[in-house]
Image: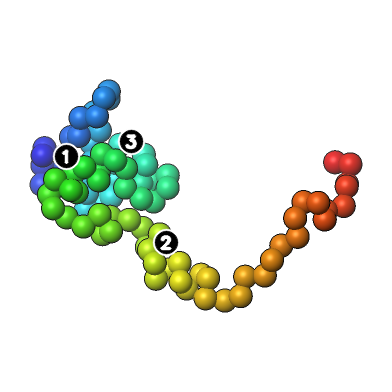
């Protein structure tokens, strides 16, 4: 712990800085894919916190169920496409 919400996590080289409350990790994982990297998960586990609280809502079950609550129609396979020569 460097400050109240600033942590340095050593994982090979280089070390990574984690800001848990802001969900900012210098490895760039959360900014890229919106879920916690292994560095943040190690820190979250170390403090006994719930990992689910550090994952974007997009990946949670409630959103998944909402997205797939409507009919998802089948899409033809590539073998059904017309050859466009492009």
Tell me what residue is drawn at x 42 percent, y 61 percent: 58
Quarter of the N terminus within the rendering: top left
Compared to residue 15, the image places residue 28 above or below, namely: below
Q: Secondary structure at mark 1?
A: strand
Instruction: Specify few, some or many for label 2: CA neighbours under 10 Å numbering under 14, 14-19, or 20 or more.
Output: few
Out of 83 and 56, give the one closest to the viewer.
83
Q: Nearer the viewer, mark 2 or mark 1?
A: 2
Compared to residue 69, the image places residue 44 above or below, namely: above
Q: Earlier in the sequence, mark 3 or mark 2?
A: 3
Q: Secondary structure at mark 2?
A: helix
- Asked if the residues shown at circle 3 and circle 2 are in contact, with their CB atoms under 8 angstroms apart, the answer is no
Question: Mark number for residue 27?
Answer: 3
The answer to whether residue 75 is left or right of residue 54 is right
Tell me what residue is drawn at x 62 percent, y 70 percent: 72
Q: Which of the 4 quarters of the picture holds residue 80? A: bottom right
Q: Secondary structure at mark 3?
A: loop
Q: Earlier in the sequence, mark 2 or mark 1?
A: 1
Tell me what residue is drawn at x 89 percent, y 41 percent: 85
Q: Where residue 39 appears, x then y in whole percent?
A: 26, 39
Question: Mark number for residue 58?
Answer: 2
Out of 7 and 42, give the one closest to the viewer.
42
Q: Which residue is mark 1?
A: 7
Q: Where residue 21 appears, x then y in whole percent?
A: 21, 53
Q: CA distance from mark 2 to mark 1?
A: 26 Å
> What is the residue that sits farthest to the top in this orientation?
13
Q: Where residue 65 appears, x then y in whole percent?
A: 46, 71
């Amino acid at each position: 712990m460097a400050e109240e919400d600033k942590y340095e996590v050593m994982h090979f080289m280089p070390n990574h800085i984690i800001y848990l409350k802001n969900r900012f990790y210098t490895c760039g994982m959360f900014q890229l894919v919106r879920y916690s990297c292994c560095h943040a998960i190690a820190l979250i586990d170390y403090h006994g916190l719930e990992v689910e609280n550090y994952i974007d809502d997009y990946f949670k079950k409630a959103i998944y169920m909402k997205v797939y609550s409507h009919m998802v129609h089948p899409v033809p396979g590539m073998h059904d496409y017309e050859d466009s020569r492009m």
